[in-house]
Amino acid sequence: MKCLLQGKPRSSAFSKDGDFIIGGVFSIHYNPYTVVYNYTAEPESSRCTGSLIPRELRFSRTMIFAIEEINNSTELLPGIRLGYQIYDSCASVPVAVHVAFQLSNDQDPVFYYGKNCSQSGVVLAAVGESGSTPSISMLRIFRSFNMPMVSHSATCSCLSDKQQYPTFFRTTPSDQFQADALAKLVKHFGWTWIGAVRSDSDYGNHGMASFLAAAQREGICVEYSVSFYRTDPRSKIQRVADVIRSSTAVVVVAFAASGEMRVLLEELALKLPPPRQWIGSEDWITDPYLISFSFCAGAIGVAIQKSVIPGLREFLMELSPSEVAASSVLTEFWEDSFSCTLTQYADPDRRSKVCNGTEDLKTLQNPYTDTSQLRITNMVYKAVYAIAHAIHNSVCVETNFTSWCDKNIGLEPAKVLAKLKKVNFSRNGYPVSFDANGDPVAFYELVNWQKSERGVIELVTVGYYDASLPKGQEFHISKNLRWVEGGTQVPASVCSESCPPGSRKVLQKGKPICCYDCIPCPEGEISNTTDSPDCFPCPSELWPNAQRDACFPKPVEFLSYDEVLAIILAAFSVSGACLAIITAAIFFHHRTTPIVRANNSELSFLLLFSLTLCFLCSLTFIGAPSDWSCMLRHTAFGITFVLCISCVLGKTVVVLMAFKATLPGSNVMKWFGPPQQRMTVVFFTFVQVIICTVWLLLSPPFPMKNVSTYKEKIILECALGSAVGFWAVLGYIGLLAVFCFVLAVLARKLPDHFNEAKLITFSMLIFCAVWLTFIPAYVSSPGKLTVAVEIFAILASSFGLILCIFAPKCFIIIVQPEKNSKKYVINKK
């Protein structure tokens, strides 16, 4: 079938015939020539204009170098010559599409091929394109021809989709890994407030989307996100520059292609912004031209691994005059580099002189001749070798450690595509293989723009990111970095300063999560980390320090002997016990006197003994509670007080019975003699003993840490165990006291030479008053004051009894002995 090529074929930048042809597409120029259509003549093919990009020229020449190296090899494709067709895409989608069709169908205007013209191309695979957007357009065409394309620089993560781009491979990692690396880099230095700039292209939009997703996972906020393209009106570029100048974010992450960054930095250079820390993607961070912008010193970013290609520099430098003259691209490069013209008739507007043949590339310092940082260049080199290995595996047979290749085989791009998926080799120590998505293993170097002693910005490797390592170990960075304006301190870029320990973050309404206020933790709560979102309470036995950033054990409080209050109460307790003993001694010494004998001396001594115990039992309430002290203090108090009240009750009954005994015919005293009095005291006391025993057996008092009364301290106290038991003990004492008080009131007016009934009445009145006021005071007193109130009630009631009952008698015995005689009693009668 006869097929006719529509339109005029494009001229290649470089070409060479061979047994098998490899295509190449590079953005050697940035802009296509704008064609004005007048519809009166057939439009001419689009041409590339603008400045030539030396770095892209180096890429294309590296492809030629690799093919020549393969042709001279005896191991790879022996006896087969590879050819090439290398085109300039001008980084333009329309030009890239035209190139794709031409690579697929060859450039002969008329050719013949079976039944289908679309399968007549002689190019088996292509290296390129440099940009992601032109690559996407080319791949949609190559897909129909099953033609593989191996890119050295197209990093858009979208190209990993094998459903849409089944013929795509690349030797440079996907932007998905780059985005993760950049997010971890930003997080590593504590930057949470950043600006985002991107190319308005597939590379920039997809890359920035991946980065923003990764940044969000890392807790990083974005103040602004702007996009632009190098062909946008200057007004839009100015607006992007103004956003950067006026922002509060110090760190700017630029996911942009070299062409866009060149336009942006040139605009920023007209009116320098405040110091900004630039974070760059791999496409521009290693661009030698951009490094010349000194206000970007300190920039850091991810870069393709630096490598060495033996013999490449010599190849790049050895351009013969005939080679230069034969290529319009090399001619333009030569004339731009040496500011001369190769034509005999120099253009006075563009050139100052005619090239005289003494020009030497080795004297140049530009991206073409700079081979100290071979990064993407090595990706071109590896792409060519990957295609060569695929062709080798398609047409060569390994026999006895040698290769035999058939160059006449009818090789189709589809077979090369199948073999490309399986290539796995190393070249110059750098492995080459592709995963199921056509991607290599991701490895980046972290590079830093550092100003040298000569004042020149140099590219310094400061770390790496290896996606093949286990999670958490893939990121490594050294400490020898230089930051914005050459500083050695990491610049801060946060919306809000970090909240110190002892406070928590409260988000500001309507702002990102990185913008917040810091408020102190409430009472009883702490935060022990910086930027804590919440405060948390200390455990029940701990309490925050003054800074509220740590929990410390609460001070334990109880009524100890070291305290003034405890010393005073103990002194009164001992004094009361001594007073009771002295009173007993006085009574014993004067036991034969009427005043002692008339007041039932046996009950008096028993009462003084019980009062001594009452005074002393208050000491059990002082000191740290223990199991035994808690049981002893309440039971001893209950039993001694019942013994005391029983004695007072016995004395009151004696007074009443004594009066009844004076009535004619009364023999009541024989029913309430000393034995009956003893039995009464024992009985009443035994009832209290039973109550206390039941209490101790069922639910005894026990020491406990009271953490509810005071938040900031622990009260060590005795829990009642059974509240019923405690109030039963108190109730029984109160019942006896009331009963005794009633009997004393009934006997107060009976004739009594020493006013025993009246004294008992006053003592019981004081006793009942003390214990009635004790109940609300005991319930409402906090902490150790509860114990103090209980001790005070014991001492007050005990002093009330001893003073009211025995003080008047002791006064008569000691001060008025004349009243303590039979004669005085008889005379008074």
Image (cartoon, grey):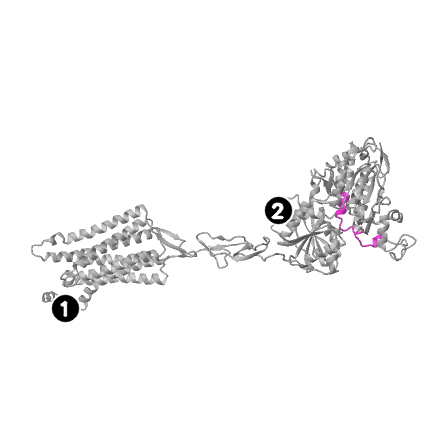
What quarter of the picture does the N terminus occupy? top right
Q: Is residue 725 above or below residue 747?
A: above
Q: Name the residue under label 2.
A: 472
Left or right: where does residue 707 sit relative to residue 520?
A: left
Left or right: where does residue 14 sit relative to residue 528?
A: right
- Residue 648 visible (yes or no): no
Q: Mark 1 points at which residue?
A: 818
What quarter of the picture does the C terminus occupy? bottom left
| Residue extent of the magenta highlight | 361-382
Dot 1 amino acid type = Glu
Q: Reading the chain from its start, which is encountered first: label 1 or label 2?
A: 2
Secondary structure, mark 1, is helix
Q: Can residue 372 be found in the magenta stretch? A: yes
- Residue 524 visible (yes or no): yes
Q: Position of residue 776 (x, y in %)?
A: 32, 57
Dot 2 amino acid type = Gly
Inter-mark Cα distance, 1 to 2: 103 Å
Secondary structure, mark 2, is loop
- Tag on residue 640? none
Q: Position of residue 142 (x, y in %)?
A: 77, 38
How many C-alpha atoms fall within 10 Å of the one at disc 1: few (<14), some, or many (≥20)? few
Q: How many labels does the image show?
A: 2
Q: Can residue 35 be found in the magenta stretch? A: no
Q: Name the mark nearer the viewer: 1 or 2.
A: 2
Q: Residue at 18% across / 55% down in the picture?
A: 650
